[in-house]
Amino acid sequence: MKLKKRWKWSNLYLIFVFIVLYAPIFYLMYYSFNKAGNMHEFSGFTWEWYKEVFQDTRLMIIVINTLVIALLASAISTVIGVMGALAIRFVKRRRTKNALLSLNNVLIVSPDVIIGASFLILFTIAGIKLGFTSVLVSHIAFCIPIVVLMVLPKLQEMSPTLIDAARDLGASQWDVLSKVILPYITPGIFAGFFMALTYSLDDFAVTFFVTGNGYSTLSVEIYSRARQGISLTINALSTLLFFFSIILVIGYYLVNQRQARTNGMGVKR
């Protein structure tokens, strides 16, 4: 009986948490279809605000800028992050390994405002013009630690006997990396890529510091528009971004499921 009560209370708690988290999002989505143009009373269904989003040329350019930055940053940070995770995993000295892990975690635990201000000072001293390059470099920098943390558990999970067996069979260092290690840690690599992509798309604080005149991303643009007053165009844009995030999550889930089936079939054989 006690277990059942605990189970019920835990379920109620989870339901409450999900309501708190998702109620504002659904409230925003609901009024993105409001004909009245406000968030107080729903007068009728309309696609007007979504049409405005796609008819706004400047906004479409900003969307393209955001996607290009996110895809480039996540791809580059995934490559660097995988190399970093491999270096941390196979370093022999424990003290060096702990030091590398600590350095990797600095950007994750540091406040975004501090990171953004630091990058702003760095780019100013280096004479780098604020814009595409500054945003891309800063996004790569804070995405790398995320990729490392996604890939490391898969590397630690992998048995050293797999590598030893490959070497005993005459595999070169490149063969071991490309045919044994990378296929094994593929789920971690995809997880790192999608997490980096999400972080890059969502980031505001760091991006706010390193964007220049004439260049912007969606997070900064939404913030600047929201300060000017309530516009249901923001609701429509936010709804589209929410569904895009859901598609990313579903894509990641399907990739993981496919990888799990492939591994299962390999074990059966």
Image: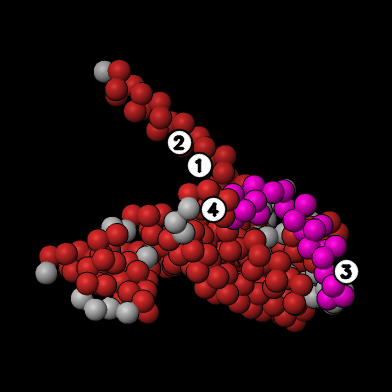
- Mark closer to the observer (3, 4): 4
- Which of the 4 quarters of the picture holds residue 255? bottom left
The residue sitting at the left extreme is: 269
Residue 222 in magenta stretch: no
Q: Nearer the viewer, residue 3 or 32?
A: 3
Three-letter residue code for mark 1? Phe
User: Horizontal placement of 223 versus 192: left or right?
Assistant: right
Q: Are marks 2 and 1 in contact (CB under 8 Å)?
A: yes
- Write the start and end of the magenta stretch as one range: 102-128
Q: On the rendered image, what quadrant is the C terminus found in?
A: bottom left
Measure the alpha-carbon separation of dots 2 and 4: 41 Å
Q: Is residue 108 above or below residue 64?
A: above
Measure the alpha-carbon separation of dots 3 and 4: 31 Å
Q: Which residue position is annotated with label 4? A: 96
Three-letter residue code for mark 3? Ile
User: How many numbered callouts?
Assistant: 4
Q: Nearer the viewer, residue 68 or 234?
A: 68
Within 10 Å of disc 3 (Cα), the crowding (few <14, some 14-19, many 20+) is few
Measure the alpha-carbon separation of dots 2 and 1: 6 Å
Q: Is residue 220 above or below residue 107?
A: below
Residue 63 point in image, percent of width and height:
68, 75
User: Horizontal placement of 61 versus 252: left or right?
Assistant: right
Q: Nearer the viewer, residue 233 or 144?
A: 144
Residue 106 in magenta stretch: yes
Q: Are marks 2 and 4 in contact (CB under 8 Å)?
A: no
Q: Which residue position is annotated with label 3? A: 125
Q: On the rendered image, what quadrant is the N terminus found in?
A: top left
Under circle 1, the secondary element is helix
Badge number at residue 14: 2
Measure the alpha-carbon separation of dots 1 and 4: 41 Å
Q: Which residue position is annotated with label 1? A: 18
